[in-house]
Amino acid sequence: MGREKFSKTQSYAKLETPHSLVHDNIKKAVECVENGTCTKESKNVMSYFSEAEKASNTVIDILDAMLKEERSSRH
């Protein structure tokens, strides 16, 4: 339903990269903790979470833009 409703917005195309970055950085953080490479330097895992948070904020901004675009297209 979401794809059908929002894929025609200009912002939809901008969503893929930051969305992937959220998942990629969380995956790196989990792997880093599981294999022990982050235990010596906690700043590594923190940088992954920081990057994931930045990308997540971008995703939220894009979702807001998509909603506004979709609403304005109805008028």
Image (tube, helix red, strand yellow):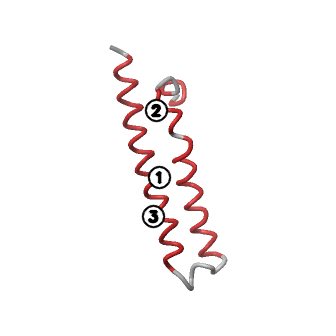
Rounded to the nearest whole Å, what is the CA distance between mark 1 and mark 2? 15 Å
The local secondary structure at tag 3 comes to helix
> Residue 52 location in percent, x, y?
49, 58
Question: Which residue is label 1 attached to?
Answer: 55
> Residue 12 location in percent, x, y?
50, 32
- Residue farthest toward the bottom in the current orientation of the protein: 40
Question: Which residue is label 2 attached to?
Answer: 11
Identify the residue at horizontal 60%, vertical 65% (top origin).
28
Residue 53 in the image: above or below residue 31: above
Question: Which residue is label 3 attached to?
Answer: 50
Q: Earlier in the sequence, mark 1 or mark 2?
A: 2
Judge the density around disc 3: few (<14), some (14-19), many (≥20) Cα neighbours within 10 Å.
Answer: some
Judge the density around disc 2: few (<14), some (14-19), many (≥20) Cα neighbours within 10 Å.
Answer: some
> Residue 44 location in percent, x, y?
53, 74
Q: Amino acid at mark 2?
A: Ser
Residue 49 in the image: above or below residue 55: below
The local secondary structure at tag 1 comes to helix
> Residue 63 location in percent, x, y?
42, 38
Q: How many marks?
A: 3
Q: Are discs 1 and 2 less than 8 Å apart at CB?
A: no
Identify the residue at horizontal 57%, vertical 55% (top origin).
23
Of residues 47 and 3, the one nearer the viewer is 47
Identify the residue at horizontal 55%, vertical 53% (top origin).
21
